[in-house]
Image (cartoon, rainbow, N blue to C red):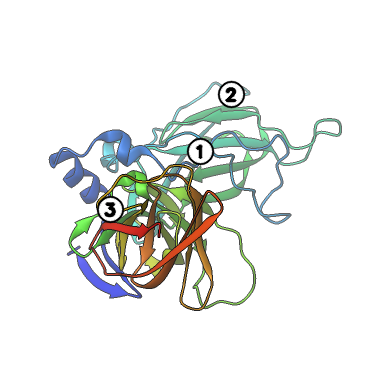
């Protein structure tokens, strides 16, 4: 599918198929760990209690470990039917795809769990088996089961009945991935200076919501169900914040470039112009309307500020000094406040 580009509320984005995106990244020498990280969120073992999809939604897995996506497997890598002796365990082969319109199986990053159809009186719903391969085959006693699969923040469940014949099940996981980057003009913002939070829905939706993934670093991949999301991009710890709506399509990587109109400013309290900065200075940065943007203590505080007008107030040895200044996009610099 050809790449598509567009702009929406300060963000530039493009969609390309996941396998093509990762192959391209490999060809360009992008480090594998950068593609493996999912916003600091680990999609690890679920809680001990499990409920089928008809009961309650599955909670998000606890944060922490990376996850890796690879190109889809060729058709020959699909699960194979395994026969068994009469009266013995029944073969259950499972695989997942992005949806009916994307028939190739998902290559890896999947977590499979098998649960009993009915909870144990004492233990509740607890996984009987777990596999982290792309297309595992389980050997299970005849009976009723619930199969649960997760792929990043996307998941699906299905009830399965095993009698005597082998069973093969294909799960549809209409999910895509998001990769984020921030820029000021034509300059890429270093990874350690910017982070992103992802929320479901549009920024214009009403009601309080919690992010589905937060503290995501530049270049991380986050796998989410298809749909609309909005990104909150935080450049530094000042007021350089940009919100952007995006649309994620199944089986595609959405690259999002968010443009900030901001600059990095260093503050100095000096006795004379060009002099040494005075230590132990308390700083407050205000907007013209009096809103506090940043407070800090030190000789050389750095703050990322959105483009606009500000006032810096410095307090040292019981005295207060101030200066008005202006921030221009992409123009980093020093602001000296004279202690006189």
Q: Residues within 10 Å of mark 3 (few under 14, many from 20)?
A: some
Q: Does label 1 or label 3 sit earlier along the sequence? A: 1
**Which one is nearer the viewer's eye here, 308 or 281?**
281
Q: Which residue is mark 2?
A: 86
User: Where is 97 relative to 186, above or below?
Assistant: above
Residue farthest right in this picture: 121
- Picture coordinates of residue 311 (x, y %)? 43, 69
Q: Which residue is mark 1?
A: 42
- Picture coordinates of residue 214 (x, y %)? 50, 51
The residue located at (47%, 26%) in the rendering is: 83
User: Disc 2 to disc 1, how far (Cα)?
Assistant: 41 Å
User: Disc 3 to disc 2, how far (Cα)?
Assistant: 63 Å
Q: Does label 3 or label 2 sit earlier along the sequence? A: 2
Between disc 2 and disc 1, the foreground one is 1
The residue located at (35%, 75%) in the rendering is: 9
Between disc 1 and disc 3, the foreground one is 3
Q: Is residue 172 left or right of residue 272?
A: right
User: Disc 1 to disc 3, how far (Cα)?
Assistant: 25 Å
**Which one is nearer the viewer's eye here, 36 or 265?**
265
Residue farthest front in this picture: 340
Q: Which residue is mark 3?
A: 189
């Amino acid at each position: 599918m050809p790449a598509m580009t567009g702009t929406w509320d300060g963000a530039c984005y493009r969609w390309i198929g996941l396998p093509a995106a990762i192959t391209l990244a490999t060809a360009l020498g992008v480090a594998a760990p950068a593609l493996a990280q999912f916003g600091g969120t680990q999609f690890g073992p679920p809680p001990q209690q499990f409920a089928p999809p008809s009961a309650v939604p599955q909670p998000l897995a606890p944060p922490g470990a990376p996850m890796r996506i690879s190109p889809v497997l060729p058709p020959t890598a699909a699960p194979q039917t395994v026969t068994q002796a009469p009266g013995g365990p029944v073969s259950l082969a499972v695989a997942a795809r992005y949806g009916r319109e994307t028939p190739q199986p998902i290559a890896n990053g999947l977590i499979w769990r098998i649960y009993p159809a009915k909870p144990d009186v004492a233990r509740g719903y607890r996984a009987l088996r777990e596999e982290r391969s792309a297309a595992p085959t389980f050997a299970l006693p005849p009976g009723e089961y619930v199969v649960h699969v997760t792929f990043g923040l996307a998941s699906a469940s299905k009830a399965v009945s095993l009698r005597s014949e082998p069973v093969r099940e294909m799960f549809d996981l209409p999910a895509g991935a998001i990769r984020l980057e921030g820029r000021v003009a034509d300059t890429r913002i270093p990874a350690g200076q910017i982070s992103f939070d992802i929320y479901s829905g549009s920024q214009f939706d009403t009601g309080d919501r919690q992010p589905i993934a937060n503290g995501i670093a530049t270049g991380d991949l986050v796998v989410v169900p298809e749909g609309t999301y909005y990104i909150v991009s935080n450049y530094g710890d000042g007021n350089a914040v940009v919100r952007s709506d995006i649309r994620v399509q199944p089986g595609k990587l959405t690259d999002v470039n968010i443009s900030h109109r901001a600059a990095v400013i260093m503050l100095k309290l000096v006795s004379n112009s060009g002099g040494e900065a005075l230590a132990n200075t308390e700083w407050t940065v205000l907007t013209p309307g009096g809103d506090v943007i940043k407070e800090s203590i030190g000789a050389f505080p750095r703050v990322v500020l959105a483009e606009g007008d500000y006032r810096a107030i410095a307090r040292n040895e019981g005295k207060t000094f101030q200066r008005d200044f202006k921030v221009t996009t992409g123009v980093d610099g020093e602001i000296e406040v004279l202690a006189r």
